[in-house]
Amino acid sequence: MRLLIIEDESKLLRSILEYLKDEEYIIDSTGSFQEAVDFISIHHYDCMVVDLMLGDAIGTGFDLIKTLKLYKADTGVIIISAKDSLEDRITGLEFGSDDYITKPFHLAELKARIRSVLRRRFHQGLDHVEYGDIRLVVDKKEVYMYDIKQPFSPMQFDMLLFFVSNKEKIITKTSIADHLWSDDFSFGSYDFLYTHIKNLRKKLVAGGCDYLENIYGVGYKFEKK
Amino acid sequence: MKLLSKYYKIYLLLTVPLFLVVSTGYYFLLLSIITGKADELLREDKAYIINQLQSSEDLMDVILDLTDDYALRRVAETLVVPDQFSTLMIYDPLEEEEEPYRQLYCTIRLNNQQYELTIRKSMVEYNSIMYSIFILGVVFSSLLILGFSLINRFLTKTIWSPFYKTITTLSIYSPETKKDLQLEKSSIDEFELLNKTVMRMSEKIRYDFLQQKKFIDNVAHEVQTPLSIVNANIENILQNKHLTQEDYLSIQNISESSTKLSRIVKSLLLLSRIENNQFEQVQRIDLVEQLINYIDRNKEHLENKNISFINECHSPFAVSMNPVLAEILASNLGQNAIRHNIENGNIWIQQGEGSTGQKQLIISNHGIAGTKDPVRMFAMFQKHSRNPESMGIGLSVVKEICEAYNLSIGYFVNEKIHCITISIADQ
């Protein structure tokens, strides 16, 4: 898998690269429009993450998406934007982008979205994810542990998928809460989250895959022991 | 009290006593003139009588010639009295009433004899003339006063009209509007100065207001990228295998604070976008449906607190609104009703009629009792729960959205049940 990440804020770019380094991705990154155009013309990318507002005035992220689609139409595109505007979302979709993420975002969220885009691009009709002895069929929202189907509510499924997408990483409580409820529910407390985590862990333990670990109150780690 | 009413109140308070004093003075002046005239006539009569008596041999002839009452009597030689005038009331048997008389009393010397002379003159005629003059005077001066005050009224109304125009314009002006305050030119220097001063001040207020809005806007935008960097670095540090428990605790604190900051920034940006009318597309939307959808999506939160949702709406509550904002509105209202609810509480949605018969949607929930001022309730960053994380910005978003679409929003508490009402304002 080859990724192109275009973000003109170098500190943010470095953090994104750092977070994605464990994955088996080949990642090209740049902060300049011209360099991005060069990359697009040379390589074949499976996914492009692009910031809409680029510091140099030559072109915007939209121009890059247009250019990309000229070369290779099926590259997945995730837009990073500082503006949470419907118009931009729609324009992005019209240009063929797959997802839209607003600053400030969690790296765990970005990673989950990259994986989701890649999954959709490559497993046409067979969208499933495996980790350890757990298998998730994403289209049908089904969970199998040791090949036995387990009942999971849609929210528990989303949560599990988020954990699997960020496997072996510590993810914060806030990123989980934001992932699950960002638009609907800005939490006053983590009570709701704890309840859901508790229920999820019960099901994991029951299915024989106790992979969820609590890390000193800061977050959770999903890892096969 | 209005300026003109105040003016007339003072005007009357001063005019009425002045009028009374002047009238009284006028009356006594008239009286003294009349009396003076009568005394003069009495003196003339006296001179005439003396003249007649000296030239006549028979006193009786003289008496017959005189029209007015007089009496002549011999007195002692030693009695000498100068002219004495007095007013007295004498009973008139014909008219059967007391009538005023002016009397002259003196002693005269005739044929080496001392006489006392008393001459009386009826004042009835004089008095009635005097009263007529007095009444006429009073009537005319009253008419004059009335006329002056009418002229005054007309003048003040005309002169003060630019002032009233300024007040009316000011009372409906808000610095949030896009337009500068425009006041009419006045030909009166003082009002022109007032208008200019007010316009200059309002310009400054509006400028500051817009600057402040722009500043919040800019800050929110500028803060996004650094916040992203903070968040991203937290997540990366967290992956470090050699962290101690204290490190985790610090990271947790940073993470929570930056998340809180992120939410504030997002809400601020949303608020400024609503204020700047950046949501143009409008369609008919049923708020009841939006709320039901929200509750449906968040069933698990309700179950967590064992909250029951009771829908008493049988018809849609349709409003014209941007679909994205309608969703945000429903989600903020729903969130508020869930977050501030109690264990085993209820959430109701009902429809009703407001005080002036306008359609009303009522969202109510159980909650802890508390004094909540409706005005402060919707103010930005007003905490209204013991829950420290709640920033209260959600309801100011609700208010802003409602205002943008001419809906009025209200709030009241009824025995631990908190109600938020949304009314469609009459158009």
Image (cartoon, helix red, strand yellow):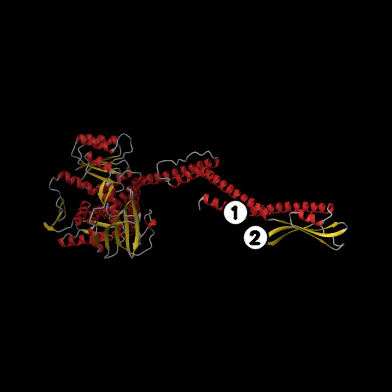
Chain of residue at mark 1: B
Q: Is residue B43 left or right of residue B419?
A: right
* Residue at the outermost right position: B112
Q: Is residue B122 visible?
A: yes
- Check disc 1 and give the amino acid type: Val
Q: Quadrant of residue A195?
A: bottom left
User: Residue B329 location in percent, x, y?
Assistant: 29, 52
What residue did someone put label 1 on? B16
User: Residue B54 location in percent, x, y?
Assistant: 84, 53
User: Residue B176 location in percent, x, y?
Assistant: 40, 45
- Check disc 2 and give the amino acid type: Glu
- Number of other residues with Cα within 10 Å of mark 2, as a class: few under 14, some 14 to 19, many 20 or more: few
Looking at the image, which is closer to me, B41 or B173?
B41
Tag 1 secondary structure: helix
Please say if the residues under marks 2 and 1 sit with CB atoms less than 8 Å apart.
Answer: no
Tag 2 secondary structure: loop
What residue did someone put label 2 on? B95
Tally of numbered tags: 2
* Residue at the outermost left position: A147
Estimate the spatial distance between the alpha carbons at disc 2 and disc 1, rounded to whole Å. 38 Å
Q: Is residue B239 visible?
A: no
Chain of residue at mark 2: B
User: Residue A40 location in percent, x, y?
Assistant: 23, 36
Looking at the image, which is closer to me, B5 or B150?
B150
